[in-house]
Image (spheres, rainbow, N blue to C red):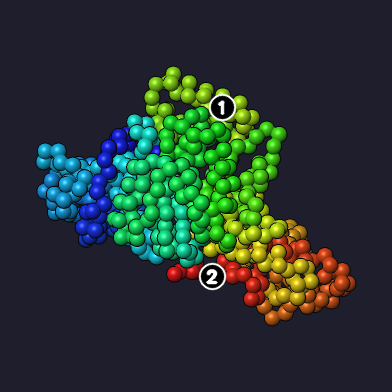
Amino acid sequence: MGGVSTTSTAPHPPSPALAPRLREALLAGAFTADGLLDLLGASAYAALARSETVPAVRATRGDGALAALVRLFLLQRPIPFERARAALPVEECIAGGWLVRDGDEVRATVDVRPYGGPDGEDWFIVSDLGCAVGGAGGADGQDEQVVLGVGGASTTLAGLTVRTPVSSALDLGTGSGIQALHASQHATRVTATDLNPRALHFTRLTLALSAAPEAVLSEGSLFDPVGDETFDLIVSNPPFVISPGARLTYRDGGMGGDDLCRSLVQRAGARLNTGGYAQFLANWQHIEGEEWQDRLRSWVPGGCDAWIVQREVQDITQYAELWLRDSGDHRGDPERYRRRYEEWLDEFEARGTKAVGFGWITLRKSGAERPSILVEEWPHPVEQPLGETVRAHFARQDYLRAHDDAALLADRFTLAPEITQEQVGLPGEEDPEHVVLRQNRGMRRATKVDTVGAGFAGACDGTLSAGRILDAIAQLIDEDPVLLRDRTPRAIRLLVEEGFLLPVGGPAGEAAGPTRP
């Protein structure tokens, strides 16, 4: 969330009118994600994501339009006027507020970062200076209305989002517009809101410079700007930081504890059309004497299925230190830093907060009488993008709700793609202690199964019903087939729920690619 410098925000963001001409010049200069990698090399390119600019500065010491553009828009270095003229319509850029002239040099007023779209699109994210590369440099010296660029959180949410074609999408708390940009590719109409009017202007710049359709831009807090309007997709990377006060608009929610995230989730149900998704990043408190899972289940609005994944937990000291560094307080007066650290700990102590969780929350408006609410901890590596994995998860919940045990045994299944089997046991033993089925894509889950479960999964090729496979297994292991049919459906349900088994003719599995309009 932080930037790489302490440059104050420009009072007036540039005009979008020049965006088509500027885009043409940037593409002509190979100022794209691929062009950056070619110029900088993998090492310097990766260093930028760690807020380290020295390797990129060294790599751009030569001539050429691309090196000039990188220094100007990514590294925020002034360049000679004539060098800028060779790469850009420089007079128009100055008139439009994208550049300012200082003697014989020009410098950028905003940060422009090349960003590769999911289908190879050449996009550009526009943000305040020093707020697009990396994110560990802190926001000290920035105005509270600072607009950040692309960071790990925003790309995580973009990868999680279900990308089926929809009529309407809402990007709540749009910032620099990355979620609205993604949504514009599969939503007929995109609405982007933000409490910060500067953020709406930057979203307009991002969309225009990326040659994306315009969005409806509305100023205000949470759902207030959209009234009673409903949507097929809602996405939000909100200001979820649990902090004492609201110093920085882009990260601090301004409500007590995790109330902003709770309110956002609880109010989303009424703003979703049937079948629609709401997907958020969030922080939540771990309270003394309270199960965090129960706390989050209480947030889920009626009529919605939910999948909530806790990716990380920090104790209150780690959490306070992380966000004090983000705001640059660690670089200021030691006594001020100590006071602010105390304020964070006082806030947590008053609320009984022992730790803070971070993760993903997805709602799907199902209208089901028995909603499916899964709250789990999953700190392990996953394979992004996960949008299709998310869609498939909820499709499987629909399937399981509609099939009792008898219907389950009458159905046929196939093993999901890229599932491997591991046998665990002591060397030399004839039989393994247990068998593990492991996914090599998506959530990359692993689950232990007994010999019956392993044999059943291995036999699922879509030709025989589950019941007939169990009858054959019962004969092989000399077990009563009726008893085996009675005790196995629960295990089959778990394998279906976690995506190891796919019903034939049922919900699409994760192997299918995302649908495009």
Which quarter of the image is occupied by the C terminus? bottom left
How far across and how far down the image is residue 92, in percent? 16, 51
Tell me if residue 141 can be seen.
Answer: yes
- Figure check: 349 above or below 11: above
Residue drawn at point x = 62 percent, y = 65 percent: 395
Mark 1 sits on what residue? Answer: 347
Whether residues under marks 2 and 1 lie with C-beta atoms below 8 angstroms apart, the answer is no
Q: Secondary structure at mark 2?
A: loop
How far across and how far down the image is residue 342, in percent? 52, 23
Q: Nearer the viewer, mark 2 or mark 1?
A: 1
Q: CA distance from mark 2 to mark 1?
A: 46 Å
Give amino acid for label 2. Answer: Ala
Give amino acid for label 1. Answer: Glu
- Of the image marks 2 and 1, the number of the one nearer the N terminus: 1
Residue drawn at point x = 46 percent, y = 42 percent: 221
Label drawn at residue 375 = none
The image quarter containing residue 460 is bottom right
Which quarter of the image is occupied by the N terminus? top left
In the image, 210 versus 462, the foreground residue is 210
Tell me if residue 43 can be seen.
Answer: no
Q: Is residue 82 left or right of residue 136?
A: left
Q: Callout 1: 10 Å neighbours few (<14), some, many (20+)?
A: some
Q: Is residue 330 left or right of residue 206?
A: right
Mark 2 sits on what residue? Answer: 512
